[in-house]
Image (cartoon, rainbow, N blue to C red):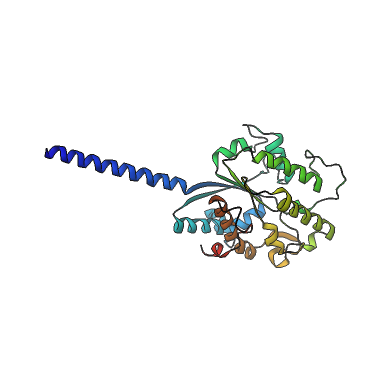
Amino acid sequence: MKKRLVFFALLAGVLIYVSSKSISEESMTDKSAKILFLHHSTGKNIARGGASRLWHKLSGMGDLDNWLSNYNGTSGTSYDLSKRIFPSSDGYGWNNYPYDYYNIWVQHAGHQPYKNEPTLEMLAPEYDVIMFKHCFPVSEIKYDDGKADAASSKRTLGNYKLQYAALKEKLHQFPNTKFIIWTGAALTEAATDQQTARRMKEFVDWVKIDWNEKGDNIFLWDFYALETEGNLYLKKEYAASPQDPHPNRSFSSKVAGMLGQRIVDVIEERGDRTSQTGNNELALAH
């Protein structure tokens, strides 16, 4: 009799342990996410933030990584950020404008890379969140000749809008992956002219008001708003120099936490009801 009681007691203990372990693992899974950030130099500057170039090169860590690490530590989450140059100079070439995402992901979709670059069919199954952006030459929008063509690499408003329309349709094909797109990086006043800057603002406004929609798997991080603060140009105090529209270390450090907050808001299903800049008190708390 005693042996039976001991047996059943042990069995009950094992069942409770297995059950609790299963619940724990399920909870951990629910709080984990794999994030991929596709970027060039502007994105690298923001991810690095205030970290020195040498430290970032040696460790791969910057303000964005540290912010997410602190958030994981205080929130019990496991959000893992990977960063990748996209497209790279090897194979495709150093261009990440609307045409290039359209060209790689729409025109050459499939399960094979295009000029050494992965398609969405290759990336989306591997990541819960994919974030991508354009570098500041995206703001060099030419006069629209009325001959819009998604397959054209010419930087015009008409071409951009067609390319974004096709990209949205493509991103919707991967409902299990969330996508975060930065609004375009701005140019300094010394690096552009007023008409070109107005065309860029028109494109950003179109993306935010007409192209973006609530309830889908696409979200914006309003980088343009942070850089310009309501004006047409990248603020001179945020630029590497009057002629160099790369974000400087001070600005990059300032907004890295806002990007972290935006990523977390999207993962945790707050993307449609929180600030598109990630600029709130939570961004500074981790």
Q: Residue at x 45, y 59 (%)?
A: 74
The x and y percentages for residue 123 are 59, 39
Residue 147 drawn above or below residue 70: above
Most extreme residue toward the bottom, as rendered? 237
Q: Quadrant of residue 150?
A: top right
Q: Quadrant of residue 273?
A: bottom right
Most extreme residue toward the left, as rendered? 1
Residue 73 drawn above or below residue 127: below
Q: Is residue 144 left or right of residue 69?
A: right
Most extreme residue toward the top, as rendered? 111
Q: Which sits in the foreground, 262 or 2?
A: 2
Q: How many marks?
A: 0
The x and y percentages for residue 104 are 69, 38
Q: Residue at x 86, y 41 (%)?
A: 147
Residue 36 drawn above or below residue 190: above
Q: Which sits in the foreground, 57 or 180?
A: 180
The x and y percentages for residue 81 are 54, 49
Q: Residue at x 73, y 58 (%)?
A: 186
Q: Quadrant of residue 282?
A: bottom right
Q: Would residue 18 be seen by someone viewing this image from the given angle? A: yes
On-image quarter of the N terminus: top left
Q: Residue at x 34, y 46 (%)?
A: 20
Q: Would residue 91 be seen by someone viewing this image from the given angle? A: no
The x and y percentages for residue 222 are 67, 56
